Each structure stands twice: as C-alpha cells, then as structure tokens.
Image (cartoon, coloured by chain):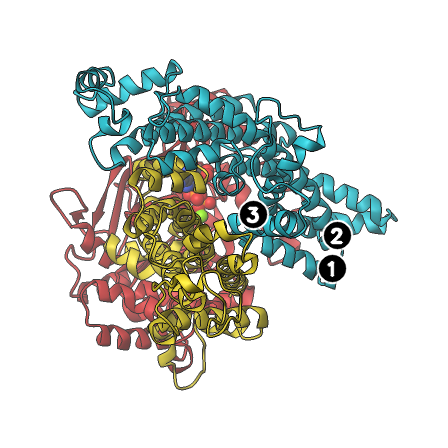
Chain colours: A yellow, B red, C cyan
C-alpha cells in the first residue's frame, strides 16, 4: 500500500534540520518495518497482485468474456489455456486477471470510503462528546447488532445485485467499526493537554481537528482500516457468490467460484482456482496489516 | 512590597497597558465550577464535585502569585477556568480593568493573547506528531501571523528558553528530556506574547537540578518580557522561592492569602501551618517527625459543613462545624494584607482562641 | 452488579428497536413499489389494494413502521412470495437446523483453539508456535464458501466419503444427529463453519495466554516451585472469562453468517433461506429471516455480557 511513503513526504520532517538528522514518526515506523520480512514479502505480493490487476488488459492472453463451446472445462495446461477454461470455455488466466480488478476494487474502495465517512463521524463524535457523541455512537451500535455478513446480505439482498449496490453495501457495513475506532482514538487525544493548549491559543475547532487531532488519530484508524481490506474482499466475493455482485459476463473471483461450482465433478482443480486467488490476496492483506500494527503500536 | 512598585513602573512603559500600574492585571470575582457526577440507570446527575467554590483574588501587574494546595483541591480547574478552557458556573474575570467575555468588555480572543498557560503534564501537552517548532509556531499562525514569520519567531523563542534552534527545532517531543519539554512548553506559551502566564505545576515533574534551571529561566523571562505569573504548585519550597504573594487553597476554596514572607513566617490558618510543618525542611534541625496533616483530604463531593478543614484541624471547636469562616473582602484588601479564613484569626468569631474584640478588651 | 445487569438489559431495548427500524427499512431499500415486493405477482388488484391498507402502506412512513412493528410483535412476519408460506414458520424450522450445526462448530472450534493456543503460548517463538499462527491466519483469511467447495472436492468428489449436499432422505424432520447416516451430511458444513472462529479464537487465546504467562505473578508461582502444568492451569483459568465471552460472540457470528456455507451444502437452515429469498427476490422472507437472526444475535450478546459480569466481577462496565 502506498500509505506510508505518501504520508512521510507530507510531513515536513523530511525537510530536515541541517544539524541533526531526525526521522519523523513515519520514518521510525518504516525503520521497524524494514526488518519484518514476512510483512515485506506480503507487501510485495500485494503490489504484484495490484499490478496484475491494473495491467490486466495488456497481460491477459485472451478476451475474458469470449466463450468457446468447443473448449469448455479444459484442464490446467490444456493447449494455450495455461489454467484451463471455465464452464463456458473462457480462458481462466484472463478471467482471473480481470476478476482481480473487480475483487481488489471491492476490497479497497469500500474501505477507503468507509474510512472517510466512518472516520469523520468518529472524529466528530469523539471530539465533541456529549449529545453529538451519543447520537452518532448509539446509531452505530444498532449496526453492531448485525453480524457483518448478515448486514451485507440484508442490504445487498434488498438493493439487488450490481456493482454499485455492492460497493454501497460494503461501505455501509464497514462504517460502524471504523467509526468506533476513530471515536475511541479521538476522545483519547481530545483529553490530552496539547489540544487545550491549542484552544488556549485561540484556534478554531476546525483548525485543531486538522492540525492536531487528525494526525494523531490517523495511524490507529489506518491500521484498523488495513485489517478491513481482507474482510472486505471476502465479504465482496461472498456477495458475488450469492449473485449480489457484478452481473454474469463480467469476471469476479466470487462469481467465478459460484458459476464453476456446477462443474465441480468435471474439473475440481479449476473450480478451486478463484478461491485460491481470494485466499492468497486475503492472507497477504491480513499479514501486512498485522505487521503494520506491530510497527505502529510500539511507543515512539 | 518594593518589588510590586518597581515592576509597576516598568509596566507603565508597556504599550499594552491600559489600566495603569494600580489596576490589577487580572481580577477574579467569585468564580465557581461544580462538576456533575452522573450515575444510576438513567445517568442522572446525582452529585457535584465542588472543584472551585467561590474563589476571588487579584494579581497585580508584574507580580508572581503562588497558588498552593494538596493535589485535588482544584488548582488545575481554577487555571483552566481562567483560561476559558472550561465553562464556569458563576463569576467574572476582569483583565486590566476590562470585563472579559459576554457582550461587553474584552473578547475571549484578546484574553487568549494576554493570558497563556503552561500545562502540568509536559508529556501530553506537546503534540507527539509535530516537530516542536511547529507546536510553537501554531498559536501565532492561528492568530494570523505569516507562517514564515511565525517560524522565525519560534526559533527565536527556542533560543530564549535556552534550546539551540538549529539543534532542536525539528525534534519531536519524544526526543526531548522532561526539562527540555517544559522549556518548549514555556516557549509555546510565550509565542503569543502574553502579559500573564499561568504555570500549572510547571516544574513539579522535574529533577531538583533541572527544576532550579527552569525556575531561573522563568525569573529571567519575567524580567525580559515584563510578565506577570500565576504559579501553581503543591511544592511549598518552590512557591516560596518564586512568589511575591501566596494563595492557599483547600477543597476548592481560598483559606489564606498574603505576601510570601508574612505567610511563611506567620501562617494564620491551621491548614497552612500544617502544610508548612509537613514539608521537609532543608535544615535537618528544623525537621519535624510527626506529620500534623493526617489522613487524606475529605471528599470534595460532600465537603464538611462549616469550615471545610475542621475534620483535620487540631483546634476545631463547635463553631467550626457550624459556621464557615469568612476570608474577608480579598478584592478590597491591599496586596500586602494577610488574610485567613479561620475563626481563630477573627476577633469575635466565638472560637476560644480568637483574638479579643475591642469590646472585650475595654468593656470587660 | 445487579445495576449493571439491569442497565444492560434496558440498553437492549433501544438496540432491538433500532434493529426493527433497519429491517423495516429493507423493504424501502428494495427498488420498486413496496407492495409489489410484499405480495405474489399473481395477486388480483383488489386483493393488492386490501393488503396495501392492511400493511398501512397508504399511510405515512412512521405509521407504517408502527403497524408493521405491531404485527411483528404479534408474531406475524408476513407470507413468503415464493410459496405463500408463513415466514415465521419457515424461519423457525430453518433456524433449528442452523443452530444445531453452529453450536457443534463453535464448540469444536473452541476446544481446538484452546488446545492450539496453549500449545503455542507455551512454546512462544518456536516452530510449533509459528505453525499454529499460520493455521490461525489461514482460518481468518479463508473464504468459507471456497473452503466448502474444496471440502466437497476432497471428501465428496475425490474420496467419496461424505455426501456433497443436503440433509439426506429424511430431511430435517427425521434428522438424527446421533445417527451416522444422518450426521454425515452435517460433517462438512460443520468443518467449514468451524474454521474461521477457530482461527480467530486461536489467535486471541494465544495472545491472551502469553500475556498472562509473562506477568509477574506467574514468575512468583514458578519461584514457589509450582510445576509447569499447574502454572498453565492457573493461567488458563485466568483467561477463561474472556474466552467464554468470545465463544458466545462467535456463536452469534456463525448463526448470522452461515449463508455462504449453507448455500454450498444446500443445508436447509436460515442461511439457505436467505439465499432462496435473494434468488427469488422474496422480500418478506428476507426481512423476516434477518429480523430473527439479528434479534438472536443481540440476545446472545446480552447473555454473554451478563454471564461475563457474573463470572468476572472485576469487570465493572458502565
Ligand atoms: N472534568 C472533570 N469532571 C469531574 N471532576 C473533575 C474534572 N476535573 C477535575 N475534577 C475534580 O475536581 C477536583 C479538582 O481537581 P484539579 O483541579 O485537577 O485539582 P489539582 O489540580 O489541585 O490537583 C478533583 O476532585 C477532581 O476529581
Ligand atoms: Mg493539577
């Protein structure tokens, strides 16, 4: 993920003082991350997966939606089909590459949206406290009354399929947990004296939120959000599996698994492929967020 | 007091001065803050912590007013009230002759520029994610000073508080020692060029040697920048060293106020006497073994009736339980007057150790 | 503690009300005229009009909600569009099927995670610890529906040991969990359901236990000459309240989240019911099932919290 370099550049620590070489917070995080080879490996893996998805149009050997009745359900390595074909004779390599685009997007975009929205609500609730906090957090509590899978199925099931509805559903499902983390972090920061010092200097609430609260809330929220990417990917593929995602000709790992399921007796290995793609991606994201948490949690 | 008059002359030269040397820098009138305690099923208010309960005093221009009292007696709450960081329930502030806040008088924003505070906890009072230079420059920037100028000022201030700017300006708080952090906090408070600085336990967390350095720094800065201090501490030695006048707080109230030498040499309130007896004297011969101030202070939620100190007072009599002693009109008193809220200090109060009234003396 | 229990109980009421509001809103979320989502397409127009009045759909939303809420409180969840059956009956029948496999799964996952957590925490940093961590990461990351498919590939397709789908000839009426001929249908759903909670609980147990084992009082016990076995028993007892709370929560997640696994195995539980409702766009069935599952989840959370405050009086939550 590009989070770390981008942020360390935006903090003026990098501009540095001439006499002392001091690393900022993100610098010290990176210092710790540098020796965490598992996390680095998974980070590399994620970058590769993202690149594969981004360049799918150029990388995929065939048209992912062009079916061929003559070549249905071919095994792995059959002629030009490196990973075989699906139940409509479409090339699995191409479909996995293109499907990765949708699945990754469904993993990352809802988390980004939910972080923005949920983070905002959480920061507002945590900073203002009192009634504002109560209204926001009690509303979130209601969403916590649903297990995430159930909430996703409920919303997507009512809205119906389609990529936009799926994205909306996942965002709604992810907002409450992020909001809760942001609220906790904010109310902790809010109680610290430097916020009062800023208030005493006559700063407006907006200015304090942006200059003092956000930078301190950012890392716990980002770490938490990063753990949600893998959950979002799994939830999204689950929804697609139930037919609540992209519509059929389009490739998506969850949907591929769902349609291939009928052919389980003919080509079991090919059937398992999209799931393996989901699994690898989800493990990589999980391990990276673990590593990130460890690197950031240590008191600087 | 000579010191007051000397600095009063300096103050007259200050272009920011409006009320003249005789006008106190800050007058605090009957200020009050009760914190609600919520509990029970519906989270209703069940009681109140009387953190600051009807406190009045004033600070002259150029003087240092020390505030002492056990921890939990409401010193920080008082400081925050003066800074408008928490809303007060009752009371007024008068800054150099002008009423603060509300419709008339000095706007809060002007108060902010005249009044700054150094916080108790040097660790949490600096933003851990900002280089200290930015922490210092932040206040001036929100007050409309150009970022470049604010940065230069910040470097300047770092120099003033004894931290070499090129070595320190880009450091983060965790890269500083406690004393250095507190110097940065002082610089941050001075960045807005205030006239009155509130120092809440500013040196309490420091080692003795570092403490002395910071205290010296504070004295120098006061001379240089024509400052007035409210110096809050639970350490009586430090307060004695730095203050011109001292105010003693007990459970949210003022129990004694007076010039430092009078108050230390002749404490009138048994609480002050106990505090002074408690502290370890630097001179081993003067040390007392038994601590006269036994037990914890009572709960500020339900303070004792009458005189709040009677539960711990060796001289308590019936009158102390029945009637709260008055401190007298602090705001009318001159700076060198010594007042105590104790029945024993007030003639005709009904306490057996009270001085005789004129009537008693002559009438018999 | 009783005050806490009472407060916690009272707190459940607004949450349940919130749950009903969300479930009510689901019908509004669905595209199209709500009444068309609630009745069978072949219903005659005069009947539709009557039902529209019955559901209060000609009135403001707030009234509609209370009309609906009153019916729900009376146990009327409406009728399924697909087969006109009473939703409440369908849900109750399916719920028992889900509850049974979810209970077995969560108990298996709990026992296994305790064992794995203890093994890992007592060998911190070693190869066994790494293996356990890998298992936990796998459990947390695996998509259950894929795992279900893989199980089918192995045990049904390749080995032909277990039936791939369904509940057997008797269906859920005569299903006997103590008869292998019936139970074999439940084996794969149980395994597929158990793996994610196994991963989560193993990870939590391991970290909680290693934290306890690194505390001072354990060193004191060691210094007193207590055997390692006794020390572990001591430490495990320490983390038990948290672990049982987790058990309850995971049960709630399994009951609410079984839709994917049940879909793969066509196991006739609430999850399968949801899948059916989605495929046929049977909104009353979807709404009713979700309402019941969410309510159960809230109640499980309530029981867990109450039980924990009894087991562990140190926890004083406001
Ligand atoms: N925000 C608050 N809410 C409730 N009670 C408070 C709050 N702040 C302080 N108090 C209470 O007010 C009293 C005075 O506290 P404080 O002013 O911090 O004392 P000091 O600074 O003299 O140690 C204490 O009893 C404290 O518990
Ligand atoms: Mg204090």
Per the image, label 1 sits on a secondary structure element best described as helix
Residue C105, horizontal then vertical, whole percent? 62, 38
In the depicted view, which residue is nearer to us: C67 or B52?
C67
Asked whether the viewer can see residue B177, the reply is yes
Tell me which label, 2 or 3, sits earlier in the chain.
2
Q: Which residue is mark 3?
A: C148
Mark 3, mark 1: which one is toward the viewer?
A: 3
Marks 2 and 1, how far apart in space?
A: 8 Å
Per the image, label 3 sits on a secondary structure element best described as helix
Asked whether the viewer can see residue B322, the reply is no
Residue C291, horizontal then vertical, whole percent? 40, 28
- Chain letter for mark 1: C
Q: Which residue is mark 1?
A: C128
Q: Which residue is mark 2?
A: C119
Q: Are marks 2 and 1 in contact (CB under 8 Å)?
A: yes
Question: On the rendered image, what quadrant is the N terminus of chain B found in?
Answer: bottom left
Residue lying furthest top: C74
- Chain letter for mark 2: C
Question: Does B295 sit left or right of B335 as displayed?
Answer: right
Mark 3 neighbour density, 10 Å: few (under 14) some (14–19) many (20 or more): many
In the depicted view, which residue is nearer to us: A203 or C18?
C18
Tell me which label, 2 or 1, sits earlier in the chain.
2
Q: Are marks 2 and 3 in contact (CB under 8 Å)?
A: no
């Amino acid at each position: 993920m590009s989070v770390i370099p981008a942020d360390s550049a935006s903090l003026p620590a990098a501009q540095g003082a001439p006499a002392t070489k001091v690393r900022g917070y993100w610098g010290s995080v990176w210092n710790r991350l540098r020796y965490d080879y598992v996390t680095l490996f998974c980070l590399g893996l994620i970058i590769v997966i993202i690149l594969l998805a981004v360049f799918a149009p150029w990388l995929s050997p065939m048209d992912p939606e062009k079916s061929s009745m003559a070549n249905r359900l071919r095994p792995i390595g059959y002629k030009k089909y490196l990973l075989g074909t699906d139940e409509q004779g479409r090339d699995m390599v191409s479909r996995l590459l293109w499907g990765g685009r949708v699945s990754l997007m469904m993993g990352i975009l809802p988390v980004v949206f939910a972080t923005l929205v949920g983070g905002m609500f959480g920061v507002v609730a945590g900073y203002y406290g009192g009634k504002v906090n109560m209204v926001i957090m009690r509303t979130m509590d209601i969403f916590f009354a649903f297990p995430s899978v159930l909430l996703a199925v409920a919303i997507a099931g009512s809205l119906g399929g389609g990529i936009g509805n799926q994205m909306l559903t996942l965002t709604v499902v992810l907002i409450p947990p992020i909001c809760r983390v942001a609220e906790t972090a904010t109310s902790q920061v809010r109680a610290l004296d430097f916020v009062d010092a800023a208030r005493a200097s006559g700063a407006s609430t907006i200015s304090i939120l942006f200059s003092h609260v956000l930078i301190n809330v950012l890392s716990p929220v980002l770490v938490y959000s990063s753990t949600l990417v893998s959950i979002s990917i799994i939830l999204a593929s689950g929804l697609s599996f139930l037919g609540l995602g992209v519509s059929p000709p389009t490739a998506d790992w969850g949907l591929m698994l769902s349609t291939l399921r009928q052919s389980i007796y003919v080509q079991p290995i090919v059937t398992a492929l999209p799931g393996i793609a989901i699994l690898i991606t989800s493990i990589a994201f999980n391990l990276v967020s673990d590593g990130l948490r460890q690197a950031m949690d240590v008191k600087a | 007091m000579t010191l007051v008059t000397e600095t009063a002359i300096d103050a007259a030269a200050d272009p920011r001065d409006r009320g003249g040397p005789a006008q106190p820098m800050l007058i605090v009138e009957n200020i009050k803050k009760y914190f609600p305690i919520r509990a029970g099923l519906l989270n209703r208010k069940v009681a109140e912590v009387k953190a600051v309960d009807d406190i009045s005093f004033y600070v002259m221009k150029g003087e240092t007013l020390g505030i002492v009292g056990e921890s939990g007696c409401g010193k920080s709450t008082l400081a925050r009230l003066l800074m408008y960081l928490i809303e007060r329930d009752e009371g007024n502030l008068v800054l150099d002759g002008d009423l603060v806040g509300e419709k008339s008088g000095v706007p809060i924003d002007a108060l902010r520029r005249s009044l700054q505070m150094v916080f108790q906890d040097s660790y949490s009072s600096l933003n851990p994610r900002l280089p200290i230079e930015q922490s210092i420059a932040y206040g001036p920037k929100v007050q409309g000073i150009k970022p470049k100028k604010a940065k230069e000022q910040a470097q300047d201030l770092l120099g003033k508080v004894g931290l070499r700017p090129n070595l320190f300006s880009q450091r983060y708080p965790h890269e500083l020692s406690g004393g250095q952090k507190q110097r940065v906090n002082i610089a941050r408070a001075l960045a807005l060029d205030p006239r009155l600085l509130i120092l809440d336990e500013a040196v309490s967390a420091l080692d003795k040697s570092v403490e002395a350095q910071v205290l010296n720094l504070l004295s120098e800065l006061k001379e240089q920048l024509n400052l007035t201090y409210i110096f809050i501490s639970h350490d009586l030695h430090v307060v004695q060293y730095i203050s011109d006048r001292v105010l003693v707080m007990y459970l949210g109230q003022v129990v004694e106020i007076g010039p430092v030498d009078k108050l230390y040499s002749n404490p009138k309130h048994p609480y002050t006497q106990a505090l002074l007896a408690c502290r370890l004297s630097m001179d081993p011969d003067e040390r007392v073994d038994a601590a006269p101030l036994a037990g914890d202070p009572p709960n500020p939620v339900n303070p004792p009736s009458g005189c709040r100190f009677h539960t711990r007072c060796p001289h308590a009599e019936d009158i102390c339980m029945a009637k709260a002693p008055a401190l007298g009109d602090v705001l009318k008193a001159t700076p060198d007057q010594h007042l105590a809220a104790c029945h024993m200090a007030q003639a005709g109060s009904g306490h057996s150790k009270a001085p005789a009234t004129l009537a008693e003396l002559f009438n018999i | 503690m009783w005050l806490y229990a009472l407060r916690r109980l009272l707190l459940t009421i607004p949450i349940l009300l919130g749950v009903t509001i969300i479930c009510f809103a689901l019908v509004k979320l669905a595209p199209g005229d709500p009444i068309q989502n609630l009745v069978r397409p072949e219903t005659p127009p005069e009947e539709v009009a009557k039902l529209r009045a019955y559901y209060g759909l000609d009135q403001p939303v707030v009234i509609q909600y209370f009309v609906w809420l009153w019916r729900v409180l009376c146990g009327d969840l409406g009728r399924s569009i697909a087969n006109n059956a009473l939703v409440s009956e369908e849900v109750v029948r399916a719920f028992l099927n889900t509850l049974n496999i979810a209970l077995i799964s969560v108990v298996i996952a709990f026992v296994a995670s305790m064992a794995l957590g203890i093994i890992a925490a007592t060998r911190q940093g070693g190869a066994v610890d790494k293996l356990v961590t890998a298992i936990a990461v796998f459990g947390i990351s695996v998509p259950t529906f894929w795992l279900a498919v893989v199980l089918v590939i192995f045990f049904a397709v390749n080995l032909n040991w277990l039936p791939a789908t369904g509940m057997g000839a008797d269906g859920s009426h005569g299903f006997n969990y103590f008869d292998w001929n019936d139970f074999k249908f439940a084996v794969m759903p149980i395994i597929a359901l158990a793996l994610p909670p196994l991963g989560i609980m193993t990870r939590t147990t391991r970290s909680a236990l290693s934290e306890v084992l690194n505390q001072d009082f354990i060193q004191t016990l060691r210094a007193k000459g207590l055997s390692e076995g006794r020390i572990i028993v001591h430490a495990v007892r320490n983390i038990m309240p948290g672990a049982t709370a987790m058990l309850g929560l995971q049960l709630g997640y399994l009951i609410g989240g079984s839709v994917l696994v049940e879909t793969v195995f066509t196991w006739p539980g609430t999850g399968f019911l949801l899948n059916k409702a989605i495929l046929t766009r049977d909104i009353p069935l979807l709404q009713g099932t979700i309402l019941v599952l969410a309510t159960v989840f809230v109640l499980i959370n309530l029981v867990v919290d109450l039980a924990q405050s009894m087991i562990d009086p140190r926890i004083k939550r406001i």
